[in-house]
Image (tube, rainbow, N blue to C red):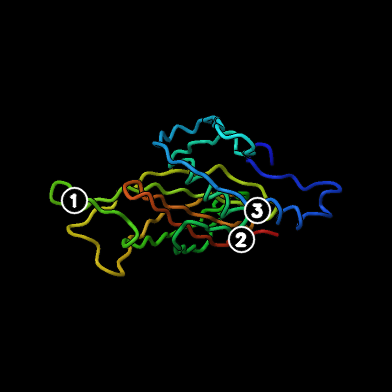
Amino acid sequence: MADETGGEALINAQRLQALPTVYADTRDYYWLGFSRDREDDDLHHEIEIEVLRRGVEVRSRTGFIDLSAEAEGDQKVEAALLFDSFAGTSPLELSLGVPLQPYKRKLEVPLDVRIPLESVTMVETAGAFVGELEVRISVMDKEGNQASSEVRALSVEGEGPPAEGSFYTYSTLLEIRNRDHKVVVGVQDILGGGSLAGTAKLDSPYSR
């Protein structure tokens, strides 16, 4: 991993000298970066560094993956599901209704997602203000079993720019196994590039 990312490995006996090694490695250096046009193709792109000055040691990552907005959204939902990490997202309010048990092993759970319209980019089109969103819903039971994430396109429309403090409520029905679950919802703002995420816990009244 250190070789791939341009880092310095501190393993085995080297761990005993971790702090002095880090100090020496970061005492005198230049950190260079670059910007490139995004392709959003989810492909790996190699990086090659050519050094023109003698006596200079260079470490760099070997490449990067140019993630699409969809892949970034999937990763944010996955991080929130597994690690309760909501880095780079705005808060999202979730509300779970009373679970119903139409089948012995299945639950139907109403879910309301309150989306703050202040966080949605609304573009005027044909006399209306429209926002384009992608809603990702993922669930995981207490044993770590995950259901495949659902991605749903959502258009939000209004007669004018959203008023301060206004919300759009997205309602759906979750069909899940009869177990306790953690629910994570991620909302991607397609036009503005921002994202929101929220989580809720479901305790099944029918589980043993």
201 vs 16, left or right, is: left
Marks 1/3: CA distance?
50 Å
Give the numbered dot on residue 192: none
Residue 115: quarter of image: bottom left
In the rendering, at what x and y percent does residue 181 appear?
61, 56
Q: SS at mark 1? A: strand
Viewer-side label of 1, 2:
1
The residue at the point 45 percent across, 43 percent down is 151
Q: State the quadrant of the N terminus.
A: top right
Q: State the quadrant of the C terminus.
A: bottom right
Using the rendered image of the protein, determine whether residue 180 is visible from the camera's viewpoint: yes
Q: SS at mark 3? A: helix
Q: Mark 2 points at which residue?
A: 204
Whether tag 1 and tag 3 are in contact, CB under 8 A, the answer is: no
Using the rendered image of the protein, determine whether residue 49 is visible from the camera's viewpoint: no
State the residue in front, 146 or 16: 16
Q: Mark 3 points at which residue?
A: 26
| Residue farthest along the front direction in this orientation | 54
Q: SS at mark 2? A: loop
Residue 3: quarter of image: top right
Marks 1/2: CA distance?
43 Å
Q: How busy is the neighbourhood of tag 3: few (under 14 within 10 Å), some, or many (20 plus)?
A: few
Amino acid carrying label 3: it is Thr
